[in-house]
Each structure stands twice: as structure tokens, then as C-alpha cells.
Amino acid sequence: MTDRDQLSRRRALALGGTTAGAVLGLGLTSCSSDDSGDSTDSGAAASDAASPAADSSDLCVLNSSVTQGPYYLDGALFRKDITEGKKGVPLTVKLTVRDQTESCDPVKDAAVEIWHCDAWGYYSGYTTANPGGSAPKESEDTSGANDKTYLRGYQTTDGKGVVEFTTIYPGWYTPRATHIHVKVHTGGKKADDTYEGGKVNWTGQLFFDDKYGDEVYRTEPYSEHTGTVTKLDDDMVYGGGGAKDGLMTITGSVKNGFTGTLTVGIDPDKENTGAGTGGGGSRPPGGNGSKPPEPPSGTPSASAT
């Protein structure tokens, strides 16, 4: 059996729910989540159905840590809406953070940070890094966005451990499947509209079933980026474990927008710097005839793992 066959089999089992999780020895802890996802419109398209992750999204697990990737920038802003005018299919990201070591109790006041690429595959701060395939230059669609802050932000969990972000469905770039980066911080504080101090408890990535991207990428402005999109089974970071490895439950439609939900289990006493599993950290080749830019002054080096 090839490595890819083993990955596909592992993923198929993991998406089967708690029984498959037990077979795989994932150490799942039954833990009812407060976020079951928004209900769907009865007359909507087929993509309104929840993704396969739905069977396991209400489980509290100690989520797998993966690389933070090469596009991280320090100093993201505290805000719910991170779009900054970027165009795309609306997406609400709703995460519930739980203490996996203490009966899955909600973690209050954790700072959750997310960042992802825009509809053409560009990250803020790295707008000359070629996303692969054929895409317009990022400078042609600034949409009033700050080129170092769009599609990045923090929110603090409420008493139920929940945060929500308003954003757009991410585009794609070579050689990765569609994803959103995420970090959970505790012990720090808000300062000058960003987060300082404390520690990172979890560094992960959020994933989507391929069928949603298949629909989204046929619409504007996504369709202006052409090329081969990497499928989830072929992604070098996604571990194949369903919700445990970041596969969100998705509801909604291209017409009405999507909601992605996931319960994230962390250990608040441990620190994770994002040097975990997953080798998909390298940047795409330099775009527009140039090398990818260095991070803005005062930000950490964006090294790949």
C-alpha cells in the first residue's frame, strides 16, 4: 500500500465519526460543543450540506499542531471583521476553544489569531509572492486594504470559549490545499490594538472539504486565478484526521456565504511555537519577476519549517 493510499484510508476512517476515531486511537474525549453551525437554507445548492467533518466537530480533542508557515506577521489587529474590503464569498469562522486537560471546559479570554490569503492567493505583507498558476498582480486589486494587515486579526474568546471572525473564503496557492492559519494565545494582554506577552498554546491550520472550493473558485474574483488547485488528500500539512487535524464543519452556500466551525482542544499550560508537523511551509516562487519580500520591519522572520 502506498503512502497516499494509507493517507486516504486514514482520512476516510477519521471522517466517519467517533467510532473511526476510536479505531485510530486518537484519544477523543466526548465533549459537547456550543457551536453546531448555522442551519442551512432549504432551497440552497448542494453545498449547503455540512461537510464530512460534521460528525466529529463536537468532539474535544487535543488538536494536532502544525507549522505556522512562512507568511506569519506579528502585530495583527484586534477585530472581528478582517476583510478590509477584500472581495470574495463571505465566510464566518467560528471557533470554540476548550481545555482538553480539564473536562473540556471552555477557555475564556484566550486570544485567537487567524490569517489567510485573499481570493487570488496573496497574503498581506507578501503581495509579490507568486501564488502559482496565472493570477493578476495583487496591486491591481487593493480594494482599500492595507497591504500588511488585510485578512489577519485577533479575537478574544467569550465565557463559552467562542470567537467569531468575518472574512472571505480563502483562495489557493501552490502547493497547498485551501486553508486558514490559526494560533491560540493565553496569558498576554491587548496593547495598542494588538496582543503582547503570554504564550502560544496551539498553532494549527483550518481546512475545507474540496467540494466547497470547487464551487467558489468558479466565481469572481477567484476565477481570475487559474491553475491546478491542490486537493486535500494531496496536501503536505493536513494529517487526514478530520476535525482533529483542523477540518471544519461547513454550512451555507456560495450565494449566501459559508460558516466554518471547529472545536479546538488545547493544553493551556503548554507552549507551542508552530514548529510542529507539516512540511508545507515554503513560499511559492517570487512573483512578478521578483523574490518574495522580507517581513516588514519589526516583525519576526517568516521562516519555513
Image (spheres, grey):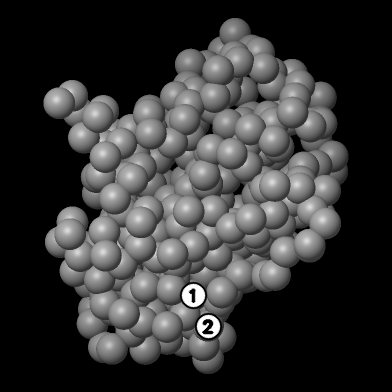
| Residue at x 84% of width, y 43% of height | 144
Q: Do the CB atoms of the residues marked 2 and 1 lie less than 8 Å apart?
A: yes
Q: Helix, strand or loop at disc 2? A: loop
Residue 164 image offset from top left, x and y in percent: 63, 70
Please tell me which of labels 2 and 1 falls first in the chain: 2
Q: Is residue 44 above or below residue 227?
A: below
Q: Which mark is residue 218?
A: none
Q: Is residue 162 visible in the rendered structure shown here?
A: yes
154 sits left or right of 45 in the view: left
Quarter the C terminus occupies: top left
Residue assigned mark 2: 34
Task: Find residue 245 and report its image quarter.
Answer: bottom left
Residue 265 image offset from top left, x and y in percent: 34, 72
Q: Is residue 187 above or below residue 14?
A: below
Residue 192 image offset from top left, x and y in percent: 61, 70
Separation of disc 2 and disc 1 at Cα? 8 Å
| Residue at x 62% of width, y 42% of height | 212
Q: Helix, strand or loop at disc 1? A: strand
Q: Is residue 271 visible in the rendered structure shown here?
A: no
Task: Find residue 5 and report its image quarter.
Answer: top left
Residue assigned mark 1: 96
